[in-house]
Image (tube, rainbow, N blue to C red):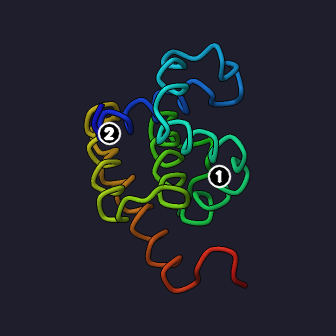
Amino acid sequence: MNRHEQRKKIFQIIFQKDHDLVDLEKTAFFDLYETHEYIKRIVDFYVASQPDVDADISAHLNKYTLERIPKVDRNILRTAISEIREGDSPERVVINEAVLLAKTYGEKDSFRFVNGVLKNFIRETDENPYGEQ
């Protein structure tokens, strides 16, 4: 399974975990979570760091709250931020993949919104690396 397919599965698992309505073990694709190290690493990071990931997203929203944005967009952003923080792919690749997910699963202009939030996030984190005050 290539990295693009793994990102789709990561997004789908995180989407199912939104508001903790489904236990990780009961999500679709749990078998892939158990057998693919990259999927497991990113999902585990998200589960362990959800408040921080959500805070990273919220800090880059203008006139919106995390709960007001569509569930698809919210979870694409969670997937991308988790991968940027924990993964080993270049940031540009992660943003491009998030835009592709938004074009596939989101509303008409979701990809623009996702792209803007992630570019602002990258711009700020490049100036202020994670964990530094």
Location of residue 53 in the rendering, given as x and y in whole percent from the top left corner:
63, 54
* Residue position marked by numbered label 1 in the rendering: 54
Identify the residue at horizontal 56%, vertical 44% (top origin): 41
Pick the residue in front: 48 or 57: 48
Given the image, on which type of amino acid does mark 1 rest?
Asp
Q: Position of residue 7 (x, y in %)?
A: 38, 39
Q: Quadrant of residue 131?
A: bottom right
Return the x and y of residue 18 as percentages of the image width and height: 63, 30
Residue 91 picture quarter:
bottom left
Query: Quick one: SS at disc 2?
Result: helix
The residue depicted at 38 percent of the width and 53 percent of the height is 113
Residue at point 48%, 55% (across, down): 87
Confirm or deny contact between disc 1 and disc 2 (CB under 8 A).
no
Which residue is labeled 2 in the image? Answer: 101
| Distance from Cα at disc 1 to Cα at disc 2 | 19 Å
Mark 1 crowdedness (10 Å alpha carbons): few <14, some 14-19, many ≥20: some
Residue 17, above or below 52 = above
Residue at 62% across / 65% down in the picture?
A: 59
Amino acid beneath label 2: Leu
Specify the quadrant that holds the C terminus: bottom right
Ranked by sequence position, the earlier of labels 1 and 2 is 1
Q: Nearer the viewer, residue 88 or 105?
A: 88
Q: Could you say which quadrant of the image residue 123 lies in?
A: bottom left
Mark number displayed over residue 66 = none
How many numbered circles are shown? 2
Q: Is residue 29 above or below residue 119?
A: above
